[in-house]
Image (cartoon, rainbow, N blue to C red):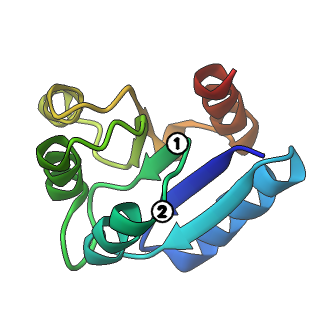
Amino acid sequence: MRKILIVEDEKPLARVMSLKLNSVGYQTTAVFNGEEAIAILAKQSFDLVILDLLMPKGDGFSVLAHLNKSGIKTPVIVASNLAQQEDIEKAKKLGAVDYFVKSDITLVEMVNKVKQYLQ
């Protein structure tokens, strides 16, 4: 079973994303800030990370920078409400494989993006 780490500080949204991904056969773990993300990625491996950018205790950009520094090669899809082109470019420069604006995408579209990277 493919494992996905959801890093999202809005707990209801993290729960909905987890439920939807679990319903199509993925195993999910959710953490709610950048520090928790870095700690769990140091101990466990995941097939994919879905990463919010604006969070307490370490934003998504710092998580991406840490993954690069640590040599962790897990693909990361950024899920943010930051829609500025410079934020998208910065995330991709730091290694994000994809980026979507949460308010512009349905759960089904999110699942399809995940499937695209876990085929």
Q: Judge from the rendering whether residue 75 lies leftward or rightward of residue 22; answer left or right.
A: left
Secondary structure under the numbered disc 1 in the rendered image: strand
| Residue 62 x, y percent position in the rendering | 14, 57
Observer-nearest of 20 and 117: 117
Q: Judge from the rendering whether residue 12 lies leftward or rightward of residue 84; answer left or right.
A: right
Q: Residue at x 47, y 73 (%)?
A: 31
Q: Judge from the rendering whether residue 28 lies leftward or rightward of residue 38; answer left or right.
A: right
Quarter of the rendering containing residue 36: bottom left
Labels in figure, total: 2
Instruction: Bin the neighbour count of mark 2 within 10 Å (Cα to Cα): few under 14, some 14-19, many 20 and up.
Output: few
Instruction: Bin the neighbour count of mark 1 within 10 Å (Cα to Cα): few under 14, some 14-19, many 20 and up.
Output: many
Observer-nearest of 96 and 109: 96
Observer-nearest of 104 and 13: 13
From the viewer's perspective, is the residue at label 1 or at label 2 nearer?
2
| Residue 17 x, y percent position in the rendering | 67, 57
| Residue 96 x, y percent position in the rendering | 31, 32
Q: Residue at x 41, y 68 (%)?
A: 43
Secondary structure under the numbered disc 2 in the rendered image: loop
Circle 2 residue: 44
Alpha carbon of mark 1 to alpha carbon of mark 2: how far?
12 Å
Disc number for residue 48: 1
Q: Judge from the rendering whether residue 62 lies leftward or rightward of residue 45; answer left or right.
A: left
| Residue 6 x, y percent position in the rendering | 52, 59
Disc number for residue 105: none
Q: Tell me the quarter of the image containing the C terminus.
A: top right
Against 77, residue 118 (above or below) is above
Task: Residue type at mark 2: give it.
Answer: Gln
Q: Residue at x 20, y 63 (%)?
A: 59
Task: Residue type at mark 1: give it.
Answer: Leu
Observer-nearest of 101 and 20: 20
